[in-house]
Amino acid sequence: MAQETASVPTDLPVKRPREEEQNGASATGGAMETENSTDNGTPGISSVIPGWFSEISPMWPGEAHSLKVEKILFQGKSDYQNVMVFQSATYGKVLVLDGVIQLTERDECAYQEMITHLPLSSIPNPKKVLVIGGGDGGVLREVGRHSSVEQIDICEIDKMVVDVSKQFFPEVAIGYQDPRVTLHIGDEYQMFKLGKNKIDLNTFSLLRSSGPAQELFEKPFFQSVANALRPGGVVCTQAESIWLHMHIIEDIVSNCRQIFKGSVNYAWTTVPTYPSGVIGFMLCSTEGPSVDFKKPVSSIDTSTDYNKARGPLKFYNPEIHTAAFCLPAFAKKVIDAKAK
């Protein structure tokens, strides 16, 4: 019987960082307004560019990416955050949490496919996968493409994110239809306790690096993740932008190298609607069977009924897998220094 490895995909209610309110103003400053409306103080409404959503935050000062809004489809407030869906002119439907874009129909494939297949294709025959966050269901859709996987647990704290995704993003939330999937609404730490030394993959794709979820990038959290993995198990987590957050990435790499005794690597991909247009991933493995994240060892069987029903991959392939670990000189210098 093939050696079972452990890996961890991570998805939390928010894929990218957001700040708490500072000086009485919204830190994310997500801005949106319909063509003929005026600023009424509603979160996500801009009086500067009517009819456009603009994502403004001290996490990426001096810049903002904007999308033209055709129609607001949903606005609600859960116990945890403001949730909004709008139809954009160029990227299809857009999911926004607390003023931060989580996904768009056009480019979600670049994020979901890479955060899933970079770790899963790096280990042979993964069986048990834990997804933290990722309530939209996109990572579930991608994990399901691996026929060796027998059990997929997802822990999402905000049920509204799940419900809204199923209603407005059915091609993403289709992952919930997989019979191998079990949804847990609640705190991720309980899942770590239940999965101690049993998980093949743990994925965290919706993380916040500052504010209320800053602890998700600190050593105690990473230690909990490591404890949940089998020997040789892997984790993949969102890890910020090399253009905006090298100081945060330095800390993440340093913490991971202290906790994970196997491989520790940084990869990145392009996502046009994320700040600076790129997002990074930390991939780590526990002590045990050797893992070389840069060389995929398993492929996706596209002939299965599951993959035929979900359509072909739009972004990931073996060549882009290897290329994702090639870093520009300035980032490579900083990250390599943490290995010494």
Image (tube, rainbow, N blue to C red):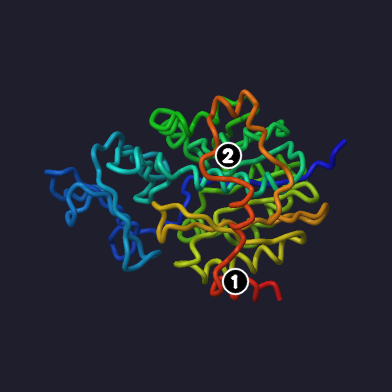
Question: What residue is drawn where x is 40% and y is 42%?
Answer: 106
Name the residue that disc number 1 marks: 332
Q: Amino acid at mark 1?
A: Lys
| Residue situated furthest right in the rendering | 1
Q: Amino acid at mark 2?
A: Cys
Q: Position of residue 169 (x, y in %)?
A: 42, 32
Q: Could you say whether the residue bearing mark 2 is in a helix, strand or loop? A: strand
Q: Position of residue 247 (x, y in %)?
A: 52, 71
| Residues at discs 2 and 1 in contact (Cβ within 8 Å) | no
State the residue in front, 339 or 229. Answer: 339
Residue 316, quarter of picture? top right
Is 61 displayed left or right of 131 in the figure? left
Q: Position of residue 187 (x, y in %)?
A: 57, 43
Question: What residue is drawn where x is 47% and y is 61%?
Answer: 210
| Placement of 219 over or under 189, stated as above or below | below
Question: What residue is drawn where x is 64% and y is 62%?
Answer: 219
Name the residue that disc number 2 marks: 155
State the residue in front, 213 or 179. Answer: 179
Q: Residues within 10 Å of mark 2 (few under 14, many from 20)?
A: many
| Placement of 226 over or under 182, stated as above or below | below
Q: Check the picture and name the quadrant holding the C terminus.
A: bottom right
